[in-house]
Image: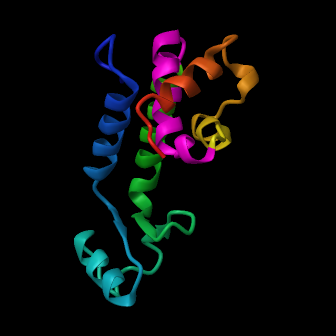
Amino acid sequence: MITEKNETYAAAVARHQQEFNDFEGVFFAFSNEQFSKGLQTVGLNRATYPGKIQSLCGTGGFILKSRAPVLSSMFKRHEAETNQARKSEKFLFESLIYELENHEYGYTYDATEALEALGLTAADLPGGMLKKATAKALEGFDA
């Protein structure tokens, strides 16, 4: 839950990321060796894991099946918190600038990926906000 009324988008993203990083029962593996080590971190091995883990949709991530519902709940809470906070025009504006910068708007001049990251379209934004945010994202940018 966004605990501070004035939590910034960047702070919310960092807090959500930290919660995921601290979540027990998840590991990432991109080789057989990493997979074996990951299994050990969740208390399993190659002989004991069948039926006890599942893939995180082809991301290289794996989770204990018993922890999957908890992770899903956490992600739903994060989404609800962000959606609630976005009702504040200030938070929405901050989030748009953050994602424009994160998706290299200063190089591409294309806001599509930033809007997609937020699950929004230009039509979802209050009048003039996209223009103001793109201008702000370009401040100090020297390509």
- The question of residue 98 being in magenta is answered with yes
Quarter holding the N terminus? top left
In the rendering, at what x and y percent does residue 109 appear? Answer: 63, 40
Compared across the picture, whether 78 is left or right of 100 comes to left
In the rendering, at what x and y percent does residue 99 appear? Answer: 50, 36
Which residue is situated farthest in the right direction here? 123
Residue numbers of the magenta segment = 84-108
In the rendering, at what x and y percent does residue 89 appear? Answer: 53, 10
Compared across the picture, whether 118 is left or right of 63 comes to right
Using the rendered view, name the quadrant where residue 41 is placed.
Answer: bottom left
**Residue visible at 52% across and 46% down in the picture:** 104
The reply to whether residue 74 is in sight is: yes
Dominant secondary-structure state across the stretch colored magenta: helix
In-front residue for pair 62/135: 135
**Residue visible at 47% across and 43% down in the picture:** 102
In-front residue for pair 134/112: 134
In-front residue for pair 121/44: 121
| Residue 137 vertical position relative to residue 53 in the rendered view, above or below | above
| Residue 54 vertical position relative to residue 143 in the rendered view, above or below | below
